[in-house]
Amino acid sequence: MSVEIAGNNRTKALLQKIGAAIVTGHYQPEDGFPTEAELCDQYGVSRSIMREVIKMLASKGMLDSRARKGTWILPPQQWNVLDADVLRWMLSADASLELLGEFVEIRREIEPAAAALAAERAAPQQLAKLQAAVDVMAQTDLDANQALEADLDFHVAILEASGNRFIQQMRHLVEAALRISIQLTNQQKGVAQANVAEHDAIAQAIINGDVEAARNRSQLLIDEAYELIEKSRRASKRKRRAS
């Protein structure tokens, strides 16, 4: 499992590699986590870089490392799912419908409120950014990745336009989970990309300063996503029971 890591991004690249390896079960708790020396040999990096990566993974609740006791993997229940890296690794390794469902439960509370706040507070440049995201979504020649990025830009623009620093700080977490959630819900609906009219209705309500319309339109969109994920969860449970 060697990896070529170069330049100033070595620590970040190694963090992504080892974090994903832990989540996918490449390192099993019962086998013990490799020593610092073993990891340095495996990945071809210095001890200072490896120590920094282990420290970062410990801060995310994934590892515990103590002098003279070594390093070990903590139970998944202790992993910090509010960390965008951890959430992305978990969803990429196994698009957990349970985890996605819990994420949408939080979105149902936060994003409609963010849309309402944006209708009250958004600065002109933030409104322009929101409109630009909708305009890109409306283009008919987008490939799947471009459509996904435009959809993500739209939702992040709402959070940023809320003017609430706590909500704005959630942008990386929301973006990480939405990358999986959007693809799943579009697949459930049998469409290649999101409904532009539904997103534009939210944008226009925010741009027009219509607080209740912004809140209600956002709520409808997220409730639809929640129902689609719940439908997938129920189907998955039936499949498991039948097998």
Image (cartoon, rainbow, N blue to C red):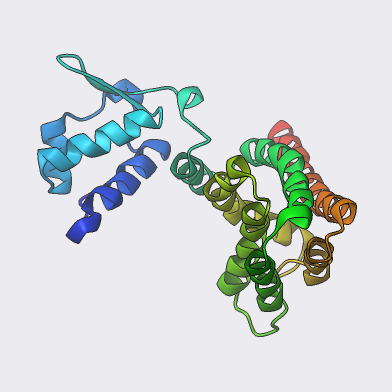
Q: Position of residue 100 (x, y in %)?
A: 65, 42
Residue toward you, 121 or 222:
121
**Furthest-top residue in this view:** 68
Residue 227 located left or right of residue 122: right
Residue 33 located left or right of residue 208: left
Q: Quadrant of the C terminus?
A: top right
Q: Position of residue 108 (x, y in %)?
A: 76, 42
Q: Is residue 138 visible?
A: yes
Q: Position of residue 193 (x, y in %)?
A: 70, 69
Give the residue displayed 68% in from the left and 35% down from the top. 240
Give the residue displayed 52% in from the left and 34% down from the top. 81
Q: Position of residue 62 (x, y in %)?
A: 38, 29
Residue 2 located left or right of residue 101: left
Give the residue displayed 72% in from the left and 54% down from the top. 121
Using the image, determine if residue 196 lies above or below residue 43: below
Residue toward you, 107 or 24:
107
Q: How many marks?
A: 0
Q: Is residue 5 visible?
A: no
Using the image, determine if residue 232 lies above or below residue 149: above
Give the residue displayed 72% in from the left and 61% down from the top. 186
Q: Toward which corner of the image does residue 54 lie, by quadrant? A: top left
